[in-house]
Image (cartoon, rainbow, N blue to C red):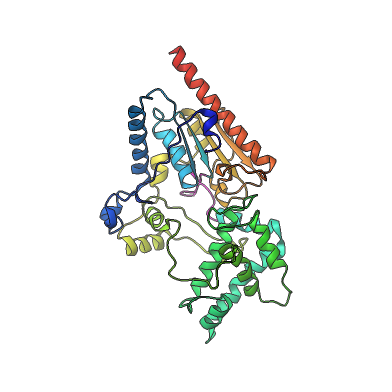
Amino acid sequence: MLDIAPKFQALLVFIEHRFYGESMPFGNDSYKSAETLGYLNSQQALADFAVLIRSLKQNLSSEASPVVVFGGSYGGMLAAWFRLKYPHIAIGALASSAPILQFDDITPWSSFYDAVSQDYKDTSLNCYEVIKGSWAELDAFFIHKEGLAEISRTFRTCKNVRSIYSARNWLWTAFVYTAMVNYPTQANFMMPLPAYPVQEMCKIIDGFSPTATKLSRVFAAASLYYNYSQTEKCFNLEGEADAHGLHGWDWQACTEMVMPMTCSEESMFPPSSFSYKEFAEICMEKYKVKPRQHWITTEFGGRRIDQVLKSFASNIIFSNGLQDPWSRGSVLKNISTNIVALVTEKGAHHVDFRAATKEDPEWLIMQRRQEVEVIQKWINEYYLDIKQG
């Protein structure tokens, strides 16, 4: 956005979502209970954006200026939904890596983890198999008397771990996030990482002697995610700070953002199922609320998305890279002449939103160029309509 704004002579406005960053409606008490957290949801956030945009346009004497909304990931979902809910405020939306079809049973529940696994499998079959086999090695420490002490040594922890699940979550997070941010250039979105970090992880795993334990190999690979900058002397597996604002997302997942996820036999993660009843019990225990399982598709739609959007929506770009596991829950085909899907084979999580670099591959340059052309067309049409009005 910073790169293309001058081309459009555009004012860039970054609006913070309520309950994230500094936008705390009840100050330090914002996360205190369901009573205050009840105001944290997508509809309220969209309404905030609508009020703020209208107010800005008024204050800047730019009532006639067209507005295009941008968003990646959850923000991408909000961008698409904003265009649907407030077409009189935004003339178009660029929704990057927006999994608007990850709800109910529209997308197979195992799709996310199947996609993560495919990223590693495509890079190296050995790498995929080592990761897949490492969970059983980790589970074996359950029955081992010195199991937790052994885990603490293997994972070079700052403090002795209290649960084997801490090690499991630590590895799981590293493999999932690295698949998401498998960018073609060096980046520091989630963590500082090299270009194509999945390949780098697999190089580490494949470089070990076949006699090495699977656990020592996956630990070394995960260390790339947590310590590419080589600044960590030891690792904190428990009680880490909430660096990515996931605390707020947990609330949203427990109320409106119910995305059922499972791991299939094909996945490199241990097979798992999803039970709405169990999920509801966890949410009740944690927040004293019951999830609204079908609310998002009731509020914004999702089923028969192509037929529905074709009949009443316009001016939305859904951009995705197929290496991003979230892409499987997004729109990957053109719906109409002005609801288009821009899909790249090697792209990762909203990579098109990253600042351009000299190392960018041709496919990424082309994707961004196409986005600019489509947005320019929307703006031209908008001014033409005003002229003819």
Find the residue positioned furthest to the bottom.
145
Residue 63 percent across, percent down from the top left:
37, 24
Name the residue: 39% across, 34% down: 85
Residue 377, above or below 369 = above
Q: Quadrant of residue 203?
A: bottom right
For image coordinates 44% across by 30% down, the residue present is 67
Looking at the image, residue 205 lies above or below residue 17: below
User: Can residue 206 be seen in the rendering of this structure?
Assistant: yes
- Residue 14, image x and y in percent? 43, 41
Number of residue marks: 0
**Chief secondary structure of the magenta portion:** loop
Residue 212 or 224: which is nearer the viewer?
A: 224
Q: Is residue 143 visible?
A: no
Q: Is residue 167 left or right of residue 217?
A: left
What segment is highlighted magenta in the picture? Answer: 98-110
Position of the C terminus, as image quadrant, is: top left
Residue 107 is inside the magenta segment: yes
- Nearer to the camera, 299 or 94: 94
Point 25% across, 54% down: residue: 35
Q: Percent from the top left, x then y, of residue 92?
A: 48, 31
Q: Is residue 351 positioned above or below 336 on the image?
A: below
Residue 153, given in percent of the width and then of the height, sits at: 56, 80
